[in-house]
Amino acid sequence: MSEPVPHRIDRTELVWPGKYDEQGALLEPPRLNLPFQVLESFAGGAAGWRNRLIWGENLCVLASLAGELAGQVDLIYIDPPFLAGRDFTHSSGEGLRTQAYYDTWGGGRDAYLTMMWPRLLLARELLSERGSLYFHIGPNVNHYVRALLDEIFGAERGTEIIWKRTTAHSDSNAYGTVHDKILFYTRTARAIWNEQFLPHDRKYVDGKYTGRDPDGRRYMLDNITSPNPRPNMTYVWKGHAPPAMGWRYSQQKMAELDAQGRLWYPDSKAKRPRLKRYLDESRGVPLSSIWTDIRPINSQAKEDTAYDTQKPEALLERIIAASSEPGSLVLDFFCGAGTTLAVADRLGRRWIGCDLGRQAVQTSRKRMLESGARQFEILGLGSHERKYWQAATFGDCAPDTAYVGFILDLYGAQAQEGRHLHGRKGQALVRVAAIDSPVTNAQVEAALAEAAERGVQEVHILGWDWDLSVRHRADVRFLVIPREVMQSRAVERGDIRFFELAHVQLEVIASGTGVRLHLRDFVLPSVEPATGWKWSDYIDGWAVDWDFRSDPFTSRWQAYRTRHNRELKLETPAYTYAAPAVHEILVKVTDIFGNDTRHLVRWESK
Ligand SMILES: C[S@@+](CC[C@H](N)C(=O)[O-])C[C@H]1O[C@@H](n2cnc3c(N)ncnc32)[C@H](O)[C@@H]1O
């Protein structure tokens, strides 16, 4: 083993175990250029830029975006886990709580900083010359993160904002922490900046705006004497002698103000006229770095999606208005319930959001649809991300064997040699599908034939993706490998659940020259039915592509439950085809656990 090289310290920096390797090389972000795959697109809108909701681990996502969009993002807002030491959930309207994301770190602060560092380096690369980054952070690590940002952006580029997020809060034997910080850094000194203002408070208005025009317009009086000597502005105005330094305005400007009724005249020529400053023209008080006027989301508010840690839209409105312009590209790579995306869309910005949680992606997807946004796509890195994880986790030596062993272990099966089968669980033989290709019927038949040779009746197939022709059958259990196996915290906490592939029953109803679909049944074999629940209660939403030719799935009709509307339509309106032909209708059902089930129907239109 080579000797560690001591790190030379020639400037102030934050160092933690993990920042440098044993040879003294600084931790660098990976240079990936993985291709994105469209998982779902939405019909509507013109061709051109499509906003993106990306389901994936953000390191791979940022590294892949950097190849395409370096220097093009005007605003990044992130609200990552805060090292809070607890995990967060999402709740459906029926009280079902599912894991949303983890904020417990095996390696504590060091692991947190090691996670954050390469992401921030990539974030800076993505920013345009006029770009800014806002890093929303809680009290546990904000000072460390600030040191990282100083190092990456330069201390002179940063400002710290305090957001008072709650009112009363008492911590035992300490001051109640009622604020978060938002660390604001600009890439250069030329960042987009639209100054924001707060309305004047009432006491100030009542004390200052004491004048009223006959129409009720309120004003305050300002003096019109020049602050510096201005001999050319020393003239008599309507019988009023000039001040010693002269007037503030030229004679022509004075006449204009007078014609507009903006000059106030005293009752004596010995006193001076003054300028009326109207309340309704005042932009208010310039916003400073302490924000106390934005309240946390009220659980009855329309914007509440029941996603733990969701931030108020008003906060994002302020940030997006201050540091971007219409058409700017806004990025949030810890997007959660999609607050940044919803506000960016409403304010006419382009956007990219990324999250690794299925509940986060499903919540953001519904939020965007509900707000009427259609100009977006849901993307993922699919098997490329999995291959990256496989190499990073198992190294280069026999990664396939190590991967199969890892999955078998999580499934509670023992490894066993075979051609198409890899393990045994109780009476069943188990196949773990390849990491980079969908399970096909041919693989299913081969596994069954091998099991029959070995005198075994029961076969379990674990897979990531499924060829559309693979259908429910009595002699095989199809189990989905959840993407959470790639999250070490989920694995450590034993939160890995292999759901059996669900199956859908649909009625296809001819309707004139068109067709309607009616959902008749949805079976989630791995879920014990809860008392009083109907099959449809397990569905969170469904979407239809009336003319699926091949990927990507284009959602042309959707129905889904929201926090405030728990009803779900089970029948589509009629869809009419332009010309008679055989069509492939693809239906995607998303269950309340966030899993998708796809079902293909062939239909001949007359
Ligand atoms: C505090 S929440 C964001 C909430 C969001 N600002 C909102 O208003 O809804 C943090 C999010 O980061 C996501 N996350 C954590 N680690 C991630 C990673 N490595 N890649 C992508 N997303 C991640 C979590 O799933 C979680 O949804």
Image (cartoon, rainbow, N blue to C red):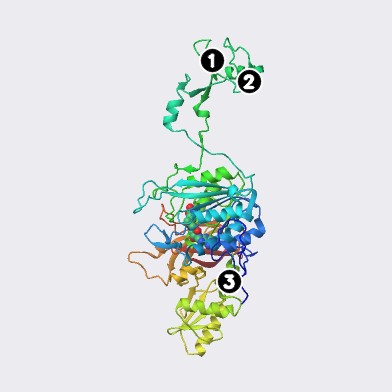
Which mark is nearer the camera, 3 or 2? Answer: 2
Tell which of 190 and 6 is nearer to you. 6
Task: Describe the element under mark 2 as helix, strand or loop.
Answer: loop
Q: Residue furthest left?
A: 531
Callout 2 amino acid: Pro
Decide which of tag 3 and tag 1 comes sooner along the chain.
Answer: 1
Quarter assignment of residue 308: bottom left
Q: Name the spot of residue 381 as percent of width and height, x first.
A: 59, 65
Q: Is residue 300 left or right of residue 238?
A: left
Callout 3 amino acid: Ala
Q: Is mark 3 within 8 Å of ligand 1?
A: no
Tell which of 271 and 206 is nearer to you. 271
Q: Name the spot of residue 483 as percent of width and height, x first.
A: 51, 68
Residue 535 position (above or below residue 446): above
Q: What residue do we see at 53% from left, 29% from top?
A: 281
Q: Quadrant of the C terminus?
A: bottom right
Callout 1 amino acid: Arg
Pointer 1 and pointer 2: residues touching (CB < 8 Å)? no
Q: Is residue 397 left or right of residue 204?
A: right
Residue 272 tag number = 1
Q: Which residue is mark 2?
A: 229
Q: Residues within 10 Å of mark 2 (few under 14, many from 20)?
A: some
Q: What residue do we see at 56% from left, 80% from top?
A: 401
Q: What residue do we see at 46% from left, 46% from top?
A: 163
Decide which of tag 1 and tag 2 comes sooner along the chain.
Answer: 2
Decide which of tag 3 and tag 2 comes sooner along the chain.
Answer: 2
Q: Is mark 2 within 8 Å of ligand 1?
A: no
Task: Describe the element under mark 3 as helix, strand or loop.
Answer: helix
Quarter assignment of residue 585: bottom right
Residue 317 position (above or below residue 71): above
Q: Which residue is mark 3?
A: 392
